[in-house]
Image (spheres, rainbow, N blue to C red):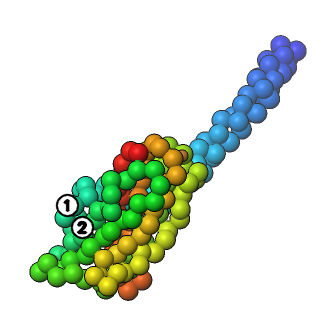
Amino acid sequence: MPRMNKRAVFVLSILIVSLPLLFLYYGGEARSASSTAGGLATEKTPVFAPMPGPGKKVPIEGGYYLIYGFDKKPKLGMVIMKVEIFTAEGKKDTSFEAKADAGMPSMKGAHETGDRPFTVSKKGDYLLPVNIVMPGDWEIRLTLLKEGKAIFRGRYNFDV
Ligand SMILES: [Cu+2]
């Protein structure tokens, strides 16, 4: 009988030591599960596909396409981005709303301009000044909206 008791005490002490470890283990699982949920949330943030380069046709939808460019090769200082939108027949279209955000991917949050609206010129060009404030990698994220709904997102990456 005393032997059995010793054994029971041994088993109990093992359990007492291992229980907190089990809690730690499953607690960790729960934490990683919640970070996965966070990962899903970030997947909901808009995705900007890389656009073909300046001067090239970029398909939008419904046969529409756009061509973008700059008043000069982007360098330090102010550069004006121009976006032209065309129908499938090649007619200029200004029924869209255009906005863009610019920043440095390697310095997230440092120079982001936030989404700013393009203005439409008399010629029907969408124009937006972008201030390149430091040399390095830059990204312009273009969004087109139709009746308030974002129907196109594309990015242009370049080095200054
Ligand atoms: Cu920077």
Q: Residue 46, percent across and down?
A: 43, 63
Mark 2: few/some/many CA within 10 Å (<14, 14-19, 20+): some
Which comes sooner in the sequence, label 2 or label 1?
1
Q: Is residue 91 left or right of residue 108?
A: left
Residue 47 numbered tag? none
Looking at the rendered structure, which numbered label has been put on residue 56?
A: 1
* Amino acid at pointer 1: Lys
Q: Nearest the camera: 69 or 5?
A: 69
The picture quadrant where one finds residue 150 is: bottom left
- At a point 65% along the width and 39% down the height, the residue shown is 28
Q: Is residue 141 left or right of residue 5?
A: left
The quadrant the N terminus occupies is top right
Q: Is residue 51 left or right of residue 11?
A: left
Quadrant in the rendering for residue 5:
top right
Kindly identify which numbered label has been placed on residue 67.
2
Rendered location of residue 103, percent (x, y): 49, 54
In which quadrant of the rendered image does the C terminus lie? top left
Q: Nearer the viewer, residue 144 or 75?
A: 75
Single out the residue that lies furthest toward the right: 2
In the rendered image, the vertical position of residue 63 relative to residue 111, given as above or below: below
Direction top: furthest residue: 3
Q: Residue at x 49, y 68 (%)?
A: 115
> With 89 as the anchor, is 85 left or right in this view?
right
Identity of the residue drawn at 49% across and 71% down: 116
**In the figure, 158 relative to 21: above or below?**
below
Is the Cβ of the residue at disc 2 closer than 8 Å to that at disc 1?
Answer: yes
Q: Amino acid at mark 2?
A: Ile
